Amino acid sequence: MILSKKQVLFFETLSDRNHMKKYLIFLLFLLPGLLSAQTEMPNSLDGFAEASWGMTFESIREKFLSMATNPESKEKIELLNEKKEESLLIKRNGIFYLYRFYKTPELLKEVRPKREGATESDPSIDGQTEFRENGILFSVGVTFNLVPSEKIKEKMEKKYGKPRKEAIGDDKVSGAAIWELVERRENPPRGGFAVVWREGYKKAPYTRRIDYFSANLKEVIAKDYVDFFSVQETKTLRDLIP
């Protein structure tokens, strides 16, 4: 799949250029077709561990700082890196967790000014139209030592059931399995997606990364993409024809 110049430009305006771009590409262009053909799943994915989709950067940061400095905690938690309103990299019991946050591109202030009294922490409240100045959680990436993919898949199936879709590469080893864990009877849909990635190691499939995404915020990001270029084209025409 080849992205247009507009699509690339939009991604480059988002907050975390190094980590977020490839996941937004996946969100906007590979996941949308799943929502229209999915039967109900036994669970909805409303966040990850102690964090719910839409929580602010500061609230999650404070949560982990509190856990890391609690002398009674039996877990080993380290905050390794942070980019304000963009990402938090946490090491928890030897596993790495990248919490990704989304905020509306600055250009959209011209068409979507932030309203007084708007609730930043809940993306379900006017989530399609509100200007989000603070970063809100839309995805978590988990990285760990290589584990045979079948063992990861078995554990995921025990919790979530069978994956909605699986894709295997030409090498018959690499690929991904996608779980759609969405409660579609609610509006906007509540829940999210889980993606287990496969890669070849000694000619066998192994996994070292799982990504989790918010279904509702996927739609918010897609809406922002459309509005972003509507504003940009208007500005271009105004500058061309004063």
Image (tube, rainbow, N blue to C red):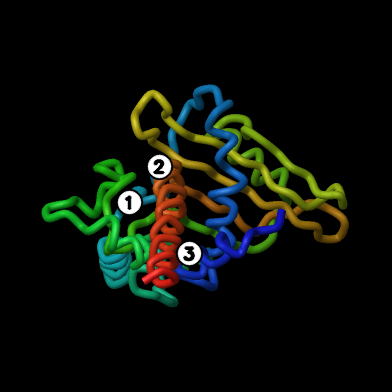
Q: Residue at x 69, y 55 (%)?
A: 207
Q: Position of residue 185 (x, y in %)?
A: 38, 23
Specify the amino acid type for callout 3.
Leu
Specify the amino acid type for callout 2.
Asn
Q: Position of residue 165 (x, y in %)?
A: 66, 35
Within 10 angstroms of label 3, few (less than 14), some, or many (20 or more) residues? many
Kindly indicate whether the residue at mark 1 contacts the one at mark 2 (C-beta within 8 angstroms).
Answer: yes
The residue carrying mark 2 is 216
In this rendering, the answer to whether 85 lies above or below 231 is: below
Kindly indicate whether the residue at mark 1 contacts the one at mark 3 (C-beta within 8 angstroms).
Answer: no
User: Image quadrant of residue 64?
Assistant: bottom left
Q: Judge by depth and name the residue closer to the eye, 145 or 99.
A: 99
Work out which quarter of the rendered image holds the C terminus and state it.
bottom left
Specify the amino acid type for callout 1.
Gly
Sequence-wise first label, 3 or 2: 3
In the structure shown, which secondary structural element does the residue marked by tag 2 occupy?
helix
Between the residue at mark 2 and the residue at mark 1, the CA separation in whole angstroms equals 9 Å
The residue carrying mark 3 is 98
Q: Position of residue 28 (x, y in %)?
A: 54, 49
Q: Position of residue 151 (x, y in %)?
A: 68, 45
